[in-house]
Amino acid sequence: MQKLALDEEILLQVEQPARYIGGEINSVKKDPDKVKLRFAMCFPDVYEIGMSHLGIQILYSMFNRREDVYCERVFSPWTDLDRILRERKIPLFTLESQRPVRECDFLGITLQYEMCYTNILQVLELSEIPLRAADRSDSDPIVIGGGPCTYNPEPIAPFFDLFYMGEGEVIYDQLLDLYLAHKEAGGARNTFLKKAAALPGIYVPSLYEPRYREDGTLDAFEPLCPEAPASVRRLVMSVLDRADFIDTPLVPFIRVTQDRSVLELMRGCIRGCRFCQAGNVYRPQREHSVEYLKRYAEKLLKITGNEEISLSSLSSSDYSRLQEFLEYLIQYTKERKINISLPSLRIDAFSLDVMQRIQDVKKSSLTFAPEAGTQRLRDVINKGITEEDIMRGVSSAFHGGWTKVKFYFMLGLPTETEEDRKGIPDLCERVADLFYDEIPKSERVGRVQISASSSFFVPKPFTPFQWAPMCSAEEYKERARFVKETFKQEKNWKSLRYQYHDVGTTLMEGVFARGDRRVADVIERAYRDGAIYDAWTEYFDAERWANAFAACGVDPDFYTQRTRSTDELLPWDFIDCGVSKEFLKREWKSALEGKVTPNCREHCSGCGATSYQGGVCFENKN
C-alpha cells in the first residue's frame, strides 16, 4: 500500500482529509520511477473546485494515455493544512504518488480566474520552487500556465517559465517530446525554453522585454532572441471530434462543487456579446457530432455511476443538433433515472419543452441573463435578446408551472445611465406583473419569486470593451444602492429580491485582467503579507492589497479607471487569438453608437476566426 505524505495525526486535524490522500476511483497508478516524465497538474484552489473543472480531467486523461508520462494532480491546500505544512516543513505533494511536487519535470497550473493569483504563489512556495522563474535552476520543474487568464499573462509572467496559449490537444504532445529529448541530452533549462518558444502557441516571458513611456503606458514589447516570435498564436482544434474526450473520469470520494458527469457539446459561441471574453477568444464555434456525444455520454455514465449529466457549452441552445441529441439523451437517462443539467439555454418554447421533460426541474428556478435593464443598453453590449423575448420566455415558463425566476445583470457597463439602472427593477416588476396578470389565482402556488443579482462590469482583453474604464469603488456601490432602493419602491416588492457582488474583488480582477508585468510585484507583496484564497470573500482583504500597491509604487486606478486609446499598445497585443484588433475596434465603435452586430450564423462580420479553417465559419461552404 502506498505511503501517504501526511500521517494520521495530521489528517485528523484538517477539514476534509480526503482532499489530500488520492486513490479516487479511476485515478491513474504508475510507478513514478519507471516513467520518463512526470507532470504535476495543478488547479490553484481547493480540491472541491479543482475537481469540478472539465479541463483538468481532459488533460489528465490525455497525458496518462502516454506510457512514458505520469500526470498527477495537486491542488491548493486549505488554510488549515497550509499552516501545518509550513510549521512542519512538509513539501507540497501530488495526490497520485504522494511525492513532493518539486520532483516532477513540469508543474502545470490552470488559470481559470484572476483572483487565484496569490494561490499560485502558495503552491510554488509550499512546493519549495522559487517564486520567480529567473531564480530557478535546472533541477526545478518547468512551470507552465494555461487557461483563460493566459490571454493576458503579464501580471503573473515573472512567476512562469512558459505559457500554453489555446487548446491543450493541439501540441502538448510535441512539447513533452521536445522536453524528453532535451532531458536525455542533458541540456540546460534556458536551452529548452528557447526551443519551446519556437513551437506554435508557446510564450516564454523571459525571452521578451516590455518598455514603458513616462506616462506609464507600454512603449514596446519585443522578443530578445530569434526563437521568440513577435506574435504568439492561439492553438485551436478545428475539428473537435478529432480530440479524444475522457477515457476514465475521476470520481472523487467527497462531494465536489459540480458533482456530476460533464459532457462538452461544443466550443466557442456565435453570439458576440461585447463584454464576453470567452465568446471572442474561443472563436470559431465548433461542434461535436451527435455520434461522438452519444458515445461519450454512455461511457461517462457507465464508468462513473453518476446520477446527473451536464452538457457544457457557452450557449447550449446554439448547438445545431441539440433537439436530436436531447431526444436520445432524455430516453437514455429516463430509463436509468439519471438527471440532465442543461446550463446556458436561451429560454424559448423549445427549451421550456425540454425542461418540462427533465426530471426534478421544477425544484429549481429558471435563469435568464439579460445583463442590462434596458433595450438600449442590451444593444450596446450586443446581447441579442429583446424585452419581447424575455417576456415571451417567462410567460411560457409561468404557464408551464414555474414560479421562480432568476435574472443576472451587470452594473457599470459602458454608456450606462441612471435610466438603465432603473431598468433593472422595472424589468423585474413587469415580469411579476405578467405572472399576476396571466396566471389565475386558482392556479397559483404561492407568490411568484423574482431574484435579481448584479455583478460589476470588468473589461477583459480581446473584447470590444478592452478600452473601457471601470468605475471607482464608491461609484459602483452607489449604483448598486440606487438599484436596491428602487426595488423597494416597486409595487410587487414582496415578490422581488436583489443582491450584488463584492466591489473589492471586482476592482482587483480589473487590475489583474488588464495589468502589465509591474503588477507582479504587487501580487508577490500581498502574498508575503498574507493574501491567499482571494476568490473567497471571507479571505479577501482590500486594505492588504491597498498597502501592497502603495509599497510597490503602483497605482491601481491606472489599470481600472483610465480610458484607453484604441491606438495604445496593450500588454496582450503580442497574442494572436484569431480575432483581429480591427474587428474589436469596429465593435467598440458600434457599441458606442448602439448598433447591433448579427450572430455568426446570420452574417459573417469578418472577425478573423476564418483563419482557423473550421467550425461555424465553414458550415455552409463546400
Image (spheres, rainbow, N blue to C red):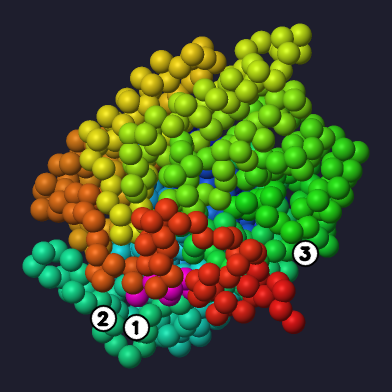
Tag 1: amino acid: Ala
Q: In this picture, which residue range is highlighted in magenta?
A: 574-581
For badge 2, the amino acid type reads Glu
- The residue indicated by pointer 2 is 222
Name the residue at 86% across, 47% down.
327
Residue depicted at 37% across the width and 45% down the height = 413
Query: Viewer-proximal residue, 232 or 244?
Result: 232
Q: Does any portion of residue 556 appear in the rendered image? A: no
Which amino acid type is shown beneath numbered disc 3?
Answer: Ser
Query: Looking at the image, is mark 2 or mark 1 earlier in the sequence?
Result: 2
Q: Nearer the viewer, mark 2 or mark 3?
A: 3
Determine the CA span between mark 2 and mark 3. 42 Å
Q: 280 or 432: nearer the eye?
A: 432
- Residue 178, position in %: x, y? 50, 83
**In contact (CB < 8 Å): disc 2 and disc 1:** yes
Mark 3 surroundings: few (<14), some (14-19) or many (≥20) residues within 10 A = some
Q: Main secondary structure of the magenta part?
A: loop
Which mark is drawn over residue 289? Answer: 3
Q: Quadrant of residue 530?
A: top left
Q: Quadrant of the C terminus?
A: bottom right
Distance Cα–Cα, label 2 vs label 1: 7 Å
Q: Is residue 286 above or below residue 224?
A: above
**Is residue 313 located in the magenta-colored stretch of the structure?**
no
Q: Residue at x 89, y 43 (%)?
A: 331
Q: Which residue is mark 1?
A: 230
